[in-house]
């Protein structure tokens, strides 16, 4: 299933997403302020990688925040059409906030 | 208007907020009631600070609100009777299932993902 | 083709999610999918309030253009809206007030959300 996180860490939204999603089977999409969790070298990016989940960030939110050059290389980038595609491919969709 | 049986789906409403700090928790209960009234199969999952919604002896009138525990306590009368709570959300707050106003099923963290995945519609509040 | 029901829970000022939902809806339509209904709930009803924003409620204008062009239902949750003073033409006439939300935004009950969510292939909540 797809998990969407829109809050910047530290925040209980990311904590709950990681605690209650099932590791390698989970797809996690970071949007809005949630994209800050993908910044390379942070404990949150490391937690995301360690979870075994497939991680994506929403590119327009990354660009808007000036962190395009700081995203952890192991994290994929999607635009809005990619966001829609992830929603089509995965079910159900849980938003964490 | 009644939703035909063929479109009845399994709904899981995921509550994450404490009861009074925002209207979201109260308005979410309206969604649960509406879905049940339209023939949908509705379950509730309480995570994080939303477990505070389930505490008895709330006196909402002290701040000009309806008692949240009574609102939730009435849900079984509206065909909503599946309530799930994360075990770690309770223990972190010094609560036990027996403290709560509804008969809840307590789930270990690892059981939450399969619960989410077993529903057609997952809504967060 | 996939069908979507979207729930928007915040006003355009208190959260980015209303804008995210709008961009999501545009991308879904561009990819050939269908958005059956957008249900504005909780503070999300402000998205349809013409009084919000100055000089214009730009998100409302964009939603209206998208909805008119692609036949998307824009429903403001009636209980949420009335609590926040948001009324459409029908409710305004009933209450003897001026409307604050205009077509294709319309107030309706939670049944409209239940119906859309039950009918759609995918339900996405854009949260507070």
Image: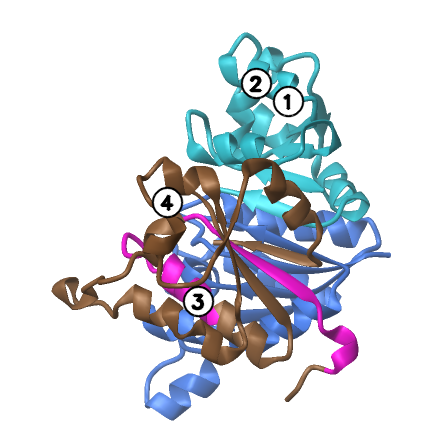
Chain colours: A cyan, B brown, C blue
Say which chain tag 1 marks: A
Which residue is drawn at the image coordinates 45% and 57% (left, top)?
A: C57
Residue that carries the numbered disc 4 in the rendered image: B49
Cα–Cα span, label 1 and label 3: 33 Å
Cβ–Cβ below 8 Å for labels 4 and 2? no
Cβ–Cβ below 8 Å for labels 4 and 1? no
Q: In the image shown, does C7 or B2 lie closer to the viewer?
A: B2
Report the span colored magenta: B4-30
Residue B76, percent from left and from top: 47, 74
Q: Residues within 10 Å of mark 4 (few under 14, many from 20)?
A: some
Say which chain tag 2 marks: A
Cβ–Cβ below 8 Å for labels 1 and 2? yes
Cα–Cα span, label 4 and label 2: 22 Å
Residue that carries the numbered disc 2 in the rendered image: A47
Secondary structure found at label 4: helix
Kindly indicate whether the residues beneath marks 3 and 2 are on one polypeptide chain.
no
Residue B74, percent from left and from top: 40, 75
The numbered dot on residue B29 is 3
Residue that carries the numbered disc 1 in the rendered image: A51
Upstream in the sequence, badge 4 or badge 3? 3
């Amino acid at each position: 299933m797809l998990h969407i996180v829109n809050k910047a860490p530290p925040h209980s939204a990311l904590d709950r997403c990681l605690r209650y999603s099932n590791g390698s089977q989970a797809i996690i999409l970071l949007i809005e302020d949630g994209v800050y969790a993908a910044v390379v070298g942070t404990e949150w990016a490391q937690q995301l990688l360690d979870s075994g989940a497939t991680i994506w960030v929403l590119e327009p939110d990354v660009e808007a925040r000036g962190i395009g050059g700081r995203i952890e290389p192991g994290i994929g980038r999607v635009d809005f059409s990619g966001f829609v595609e992830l929603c089509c491919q995965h079910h159900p969709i849980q938003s964490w906030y | 208007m009644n939703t035909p049986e063929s479109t009845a789906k399994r709904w899981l409403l995921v509550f994450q907020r404490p009861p009074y700090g925002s209207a979201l928790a109260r308005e979410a209960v309206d969604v649960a009631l509406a879905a049940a009234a339209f023939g949908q199969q509705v379950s509730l999952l309480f995570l994080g600070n939303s477990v505070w919604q389930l505490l008895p002896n709330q006196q909402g009138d002290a701040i000009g609100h309806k008692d949240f525990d009574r609102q939730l306590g009435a849900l079984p009368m509206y065909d909503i009777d599946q309530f799930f709570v994360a075990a770690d959300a309770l223990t972190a707050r010094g609560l036990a299932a027996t403290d709560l106003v509804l008969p809840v099923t307590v789930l270990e963290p690892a059981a939450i993902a399969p619960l989410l995945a077993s529903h057609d519609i997952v809504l967060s509040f | 083709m996939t069908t979507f029901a979207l729930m928007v829970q915040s006003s355009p000022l208190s959260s980015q999610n209303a804008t995210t939902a709008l961009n999501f809806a545009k991308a879904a339509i561009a990819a050939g999918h269908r958005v059956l209904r957008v249900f504005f709930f909780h503070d999300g009803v402000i998205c349809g309030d013409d009084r919000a924003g100055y000089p214009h409620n730009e998100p409302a204008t964009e939603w209206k253009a998208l909805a008119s062009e692609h036949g998307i239902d824009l429903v403001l949750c009636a209980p949420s809206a009335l609590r926040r003073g948001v009324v459409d033409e029908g409710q305004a006439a009933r209450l003897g007030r001026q409307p604050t939300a205009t077509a294709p935004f319309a107030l309706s009950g939670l049944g409209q959300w239940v119906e859309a969510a039950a009918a759609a292939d995918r339900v996405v909540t854009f949260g507070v």
